Amino acid sequence: MLLHRVDDFLTYLRVERGASPHTLRAYESDLDQLADYLAEEHDLLECAVDDVTLRHLRGFIARRFDDNQASSLARKISTIRSFFAFLIKKGHLQENIADLLTAPKVHKPLRNYLTVDEIFALLDHHATPDALGVRDMAIWELGYGGGLRVSELVSLQIDQVDLDTGWIHTLGKGNKERLVPLGEKADRALRRYLARRPELVSGHTEPGALFLTVRGRRLSTRSVRRRFKEHLIRAGLDTSITPHGLRHSFATHLLDSGADLRGIQELLGHAHLSTTQRYTHVSIDRLMEVYDAAHPRAQRDGTPAPGES
């Protein structure tokens, strides 16, 4: 039955692929919507997976068209393709009809990174002097200085940060552990916060939780987004930038400064280099400098490039 296969698929994602709870919820929601559509529109309440046709899938996407943005529709199609690929892998189907679905064009997202000057404006000014302000500055410094995800920041335990050696032990997607260097400014910001952290501790405090709310609870990603927007306003910066933009800026600025893409991949904890490439924005000036310095046909004044004869 289709619903049984969905349960198997979600178990596979959780156990074998180490999918995050957020990813699992998204996949489950998309596939539940598909199952509801098949039951309501085609009377396929307890259908087998091979009863589902391409016409059914296209009808489902068409039905969701008016209520969803292009990015949401693209995600639903990706979910269905992944589910059918799983069914083929497990021998329940012979072909992936979902590969024939056409995803809508997704508009290019708005910029979600800060320039170097904007980073300095964000990190060097506008911090409030109370414990929460000191906490926030430690989070921004760690997010930018180490390229940590917001989920990684809020889940940090005190013992994951080694101030003596200057390394952070963090668990990323799929519970993959990686080491992140703790830069000088992030180190100072974190030490200042740890000195003020006792002001936030309460009877609700989870043992070892690093970043706490005013009530002593572990800080949430939602709270980080809210505080980050407030900080952007005080700094006079674009409020459409999200906390994830700090991680994005980390990768962008490293690449612009000449860091190797593979090294950035390791620091970010990406499984695939293509993911790292989406995080980077190499400046046109830097690209032209590399081109002019290295390409044999780039010399416009007739002077050979180094090594050319």
Image (cartoon, rainbow, N blue to C red):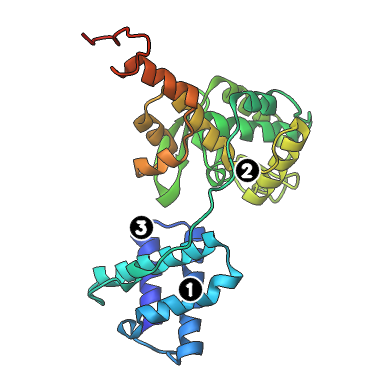
Quadrant that contains the C terminus = top left
Q: Nearer the viewer, residue 141 or 159?
A: 141
Secondary structure beneath label 1 = helix
Q: Residue at x 76, y 37 (%)?
A: 233
Secondary structure beneath label 3 = loop
| Cα distance between the residues tagged 3 and 2 | 27 Å
Q: Which mark is residue 61?
A: 1
Q: Residue at x 52, y 37 (%)?
A: 248
Q: Nearer the viewer, residue 168 or 19?
A: 19
Give the crowd class for mark 1: few <14, some 14-19, many >=20 residues within 10 Å: many
Toward the bottom, the furthest residue is 43
Q: Earlier in the sequence, mark 3 or mark 1?
A: 3
Q: Is residue 297 left or right of residue 79?
A: left
Q: Amino acid at mark 3?
A: Arg
Secondary structure beneath label 2 = loop
* 161 lies above or below 49: above
Q: Which mark is residue 191?
A: none
- Asked if the residue under mark 1 is in contact with the one under mark 2, i.e. CB atoms within 8 Å, the reply is no
Residue 82, picture quadrant: bottom left
How far across and how far down the image is residue 2, in percent?
38, 81
Q: Which mark is residue 17?
A: 3
Q: Is residue 55 visible?
A: yes
Q: Amino acid at mark 2?
A: Thr
Q: Residue at x 51, y 56 (%)?
A: 106
Q: Amino acid at mark 1?
A: Ile
| Cα distance between the residues tagged 3 and 1 | 26 Å
Q: Which residue is mark 2?
A: 242
Q: Is residue 267 left or right of residue 208?
A: left
